[in-house]
Amino acid sequence: MKTSIIVRFVGSLRTMAGRSRVKLELNGEKTLREVVGIIVEKIPETKHILIDPELGDPRPNTLVIVNGREISVLSGLDTVLKDGDEVVFVTVSHGG
């Protein structure tokens, strides 16, 4: 079963990815964690801003939204993405 999802990049991720959105055609449903791995594989330029080197996931640096809901109210990186879902990555700036 094919699963098609839209991934949108906002902020500096859009610049790093060289595009504001990408459509991914996947074999079956995938978790958000798996999709992050696919994105980094397809667009390696996003890795250093998308993935926290210590934790190995995007949460400290990126707000992740699935279908308009922040992933902390879903199942986090274990959220299963279904056909037609939209994932938005928004970079978070930290400062003082």
Image (tube, grey):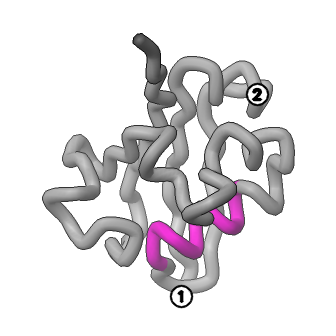
Look at the image and tell me in which quarter the C terminus lies: top left
Q: Does the magenta segment cover residue 55?
A: no
Give how far apart the Cα atoms at labels 1 and 2 are: 31 Å
Give the residue type at disc 2. Met
Residue bearing mark 1: 1
Q: Residue at x 45, y 46 (%)?
A: 60
Residue 26: x and y in percent read 62, 73
Q: Secondary structure at mark 2?
A: helix
Residue 3: x and y in percent read 52, 73
Question: Where is 73 relative to 13, above or below?
Answer: below
Left or right position of 16 against 94:
right
| Picture disc at residue 44 | none
Q: Residue at x 37, y 77 (%)?
A: 78
Span colored in magenta:
31-39
Residue 52: x and y in percent read 61, 52
Residue bearing mark 2: 16
Q: Along the line of sight, which residue is nearer the eye, 6 or 71?
A: 71
Residue at the front extreme of this rendering: 96
Q: Quadrant of residue 74?
A: bottom left
The number of discs equals 2
Q: Secondary structure at mark 1?
A: loop
| Labels 1 and 2: the sequence-earlier one | 1
Give the residue type at disc 1. Met
Q: Main secondary structure of the magenta part?
A: helix
Residue at the top extreme of this rendering: 96
Q: Residue at x 55, y 61 (%)?
A: 57
Q: Residues within 10 Å of mark 2 (few under 14, many from 20)?
A: some
Q: Along the line of sight, which residue is nearer the eye, 69 or 61?
A: 61
